[in-house]
Structures are given as C-alpha cells and as structure tokens.
Amino acid sequence: MGFKEGVLPDTDPATFMDKPYLERVKIMSRSWVENGFGTPKILPTIYVVKVLVLYLAIGISIATLTSGFSPLHPSEWWNQPVFYQKMIMWTALLETIGLAGSWGPLAAHFSPMTGGLRHWLKPDTIRLPPWPDKVPGTKGDRRTGFDVTVYALILITMAATLFWPTVDASGYTGGATVKEHLGLAAADKLPLINPVLLVPVIVLLLILGLRDKVAFLATRPEQYMPAMLFFALAPTMGLATMIVALKVLITIVWLGAGISKIGKHFGKVVPAMMSNTPVLPGKWIRRKFYRNFPEDLQPSGLAHFVAHGLGTVVEITFPLVLLFVGSPWWLVVASVIMMVGLHVVIFSTFPLAVPLEWNVLFGFAVVFLYIGFPNKDGFGFIGSDYAWTLPILAALLVLPILGNLRPDLVSFLPSMRQYAGNWASAQWAFAPGAEKKMEEFIVRSAPNTITQLQATYPEDIAEVVLHNTNGWRGMHSQGPGLMSILWNYLGDEKFQHEYTMREAEFACNSVVAFNFGDGHFHNEDLIAAIQKRCNFKPGEFLVAWVESQPIHKDYQEWKLIDAALGVVERGTYKVKDSADAQPWLPDGPIPLTYTYTSKSATPAGAHA
C-alpha cells in the first residue's frame, strides 16, 4: 500500500462482475484481511491533518482566545471549565456541519467528501421524522424552508456559544471552590459560556429531532446535549455538581459501549477494524486476528482477547473505578491512562464511521475530569449533591436500558452502543438498471456512491473498490444473515448474477448525507421516501434489513422490503448461526425462521 496508490484485490477488474456474487464477497473479504479498505496512506494522513488543524489547532485557538487565555500556554487553560465547555461546543458544531464523524471516503463520502450542511441546507432533500403520525407538524418526507432555517439557526447558535463574551461564574454556587481548586485569587474571574446561550441550541435541536431523525442524530445529541444541559443549569446546580454530572455522563457512555460489546458481535468487529489499521507493520500481523486465513475468517484468540480483554473489560471496569474511587492516586492515574489508551487505539484503527474528533475529545475529557478535578473537595460522585446527581444518573440510564431491551424503539446511538457490532443493518439489491433511478429522481447533495467512485476510477475498478464494503459487511455478524435473506428470496441465479448488491450503510449516505452504522436511518421509512420519488416496479429494489439483537435474546428479527410492495417477509435468525458463518456462505444460506410472508410477494427463489 503506497502513499498515493491504493491496493486492489488480486482479481481482474474486467471480469470481476462476471463472477458469482458470493465469489466476489470471498475475494473482497480475504483482501480486507490483509489490506483493509485498501486506501492509499495519503487518506489517513488527510484525516490526521484534519484533526490536527481543523479540530485541534483552530478549535483550541477559538476556545482559548475567546476566553482570555493564550493558546500557547496550555498550563493556563487545560483544566479550565470554560475550555472544556468550548471544546464540547466546537466538537458538536463540527459534527453538525458534517466535518467530524461520517466524513470523507471512509464514510462513503468520496466526492464531495462532506455531506452535512451541503445536504441539510438544501430544500427538497429527504427528511425522516421519527414519529410523523404522533407529533403534529412533522408529517412528510421533504425538507422545507422551515427545516433549512432550523438547521441554519442551530449552526448560528452553536457558533454564538463559542464567540459570545463569557460570563464570570465566581458568584455561582461552588464558584469559590472551583477558583480555589484552580489556584485563582478571589478577585480573578472564572469565565464560563453564558448559560442563556445554551437554551436556544437545545430547543432548536429538539425541533430538528422531531422533524428529521438523521440530521438530529448526526449532531451526536446523546453525547453533547446532556453536557449542554448541564452547562445551562450550572448557575442552579452549582459548578462542582456540573463537574460531577459530566463525570456521570462520560461514565454512562463508556459503560453503555462496554456492556453492548458482550456477546458474539464485537468479536467480529475487531479483526475487521485491525485490518484497516494503517499503523500495523505488515499483512502477517493482520492475519493473526483471524482463526485460519484464508479459509477461516472467524476471530482468532488474539482477536477475542483484544475485543473483550482490552475492550469490554476495560470499558466497564475502569470507568467505574474513576467514578467511585478517589484514592489511591496511582489507581486513578492508571485508570486515566487506560481510558486514554483505549481512545488512542480506536483512533488508530480509523473505523469506517471515522469518529476521530470524538475519540480525541474523550481522551482529553478523562484527563480534564479526573486529573483536573479529582474525586475530592466536592468533585466526586460519592458525597455529591445527590438531589442532582442521582436523578441525572437515572435519566442517563433510561435510553441505554430501553435500547438494549427494545432496540427497535431506540437508535443504537442514544442506546450508547457505539461501535459494538450489534447494529441494525441492511443490504440493498437492485434489478438491472434500477439503481440509476435514484440519481434521476432524488434531490440530494451527492450522486450514488458508485457514481462518485466512477469520477476517479474506470467503471470496472469502481465496482471492485465499492465491493470492499460488501466484503466488510460479510465479515461482521449480520452479513451472512442479510445475504441469506436475499439468496432465499431471489434464488441462486438472480442473487449471484443478476442483481446489484450494495451495502446499505454506505449507499444511504448519498441519500440522507449521514450514517453512523445505524440501520434505523435506512429502514422502511427511507425506502418509502425513495419509492415515492423513484416509483420502482415490484422486484426492482429489495432491502434485507435486520434489527439489533436485544440483550436478553439470542436471535435477531429481520424483514425483507420490496420498495414497491412494502415488507414482504419477516422472520428471525439465531445470532450464532450468522456470526459463525464464513462471509461467503460456503455451506449455503443460514437457517431462517419465517413469521410472515405477504401474499403480494413474488419471490423467484426457494422460499414462497
């Protein structure tokens, strides 16, 4: 893999699409083991430069200079609450614009590299309200001038929190304690974001959420909105309680992710992540994460150790130590180092949702919260103002608990199941020529992903590059199940040779501008909106879709959607059956249980 040249699998691009689909998946999954996405090294370099310049250099300069500090003297501001506040708001602003997570080629934004504001400031693009039949004023799937205005106002009000003059929080409850802790004199000011400025941001975000779940969740509200609320309530709850509340928030984020990694899914995620890690020295070490490359791509013992020994256990144990333990000092410092190390490792793998800024923020946050404000002098959860901290803890637990028990009701983002592998997922299947209808009839900010790639590569090579995502999905726990649904329905000839298969997480990015591994962004709501515009005939556009696994069950619920007919099949499959299958299904489709078949369905395959 060169600096400017990527790596293609060992196959002839001219004849690649003539091979049976599962043979293509086999080629691509084996190629992923050794090369990851196969991108040239200049691409991760671009991501790193973006983080260093746009996020850190510009963000730190804004956060410090607008708060009365010099960006060249970190000792002045690294533990200042206002600096932490402004880095939260800067990160949230970049997420909302579309310049942080889900940016660039690793998130299927090839050309242009930014979705975000290019899409959400564009009228007539698709929007997806979460409860259109229950919340008045939210029906419809077309972005209106009102939606564009709300989104624009969110950008403006977020920016205002960064550039508007700060207030002196010395008179807030606990202000004197914080100043003493920071070594400030009584006459010194304690700058904070004006809490009044947070109110319009929160209100506008809630309006956005009721109008368009995709644009709302792209702002990462499960991470940043609670922090904004704590900033707004700082004069009421007190500054020490605000610090404790922020500790509770980051702990819930870690615990949610750690608990959701228990099970079959995350063991399948780690090998694919490590294969895409540009800092690993060679192909041999990537192969070590698989049981017996190239015939058996199940996770190896090393992969399970990294996934659960260095992932699950760390993400559950050390956050609890940090929240509830104040001494000895070395245990706190060791826990901080472990959590910083966790985020450094995640950053280094360049996961396909590319949440790089988020990982940098959380690496800094653990240092700020637990080194800057150790669990003493009123800054620890034990002995805090329980009238505030206990309700905050309970409120922050509601969505993660509900989302693990009923993943159909809660997106995996507010469920705090970040990158655990237990995702709602889908695969799109187009009859010959049908995919082009989407470019003809859908208003959006970018063409189909394959068209974006064809601007750089010849058509045959573009298909090989995009098939990387099909191989990648096959390596995860949902891939074999999704392919089995389509294989059963279409029959071998149509599945293997006639239909064009697209990984939905990537494909939907060109339609809604954002995806973070959450299949709720491309369920039947999006398919219905696409159908309204494209008018596919029965059988032209099929979607195999699977919900996340509930924490207390051993199966996942799936559905097959025909864009013209709606849901034509439903059923379940055992997580173990899909997770234990090879990406290319050498033993045939996994066992599927059927609970519903529409009379209007016209399957060509074995199941009717």
Image: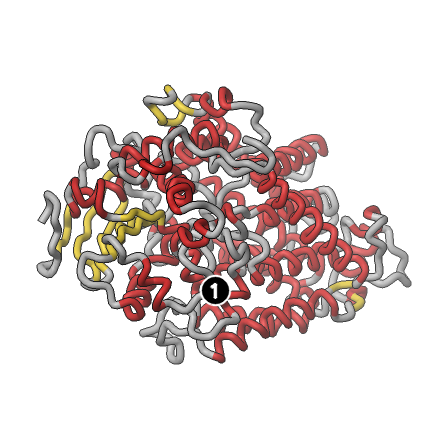
Residue 409: % across, % down: 35, 58
Residue 337: % across, % down: 66, 34
- Along the line of sight, the residue nearer the viewer: 219 or 464: 464
Looking at the image, residue 307 sits to the left or right of residue 180; the answer is left
Q: Quadrant of the N terminus?
A: top right
- Along the line of sight, the residue nearer the viewer: 546 or 37: 37
Q: Residues within 10 Å of mark 1 (few under 14, many from 20)?
A: many
Residue 99's quadrant in the figure? bottom right
For badge 1, the amino acid type reads: Ser
Question: How many marks on residues?
Answer: 1
- Along the line of sight, the residue nearer the viewer: 409 or 105: 105
Q: Is residue 495 above or below residue 150?
A: above
Residue 473's quadrant in the figure? top left
Residue 212: % across, % down: 43, 68
Query: Residue at the location (55% across, 36% down)?
Result: 5
Q: Which residue corresponds to mark 1? A: 445
Residue 425: % across, % down: 34, 48
Query: Residue at the location (52% across, 38% down)?
Result: 39
Looking at the image, residue 117 sits to the left or right of residue 212; the answer is right
Query: Residue at the location (39% across, 40% down)?
Result: 464
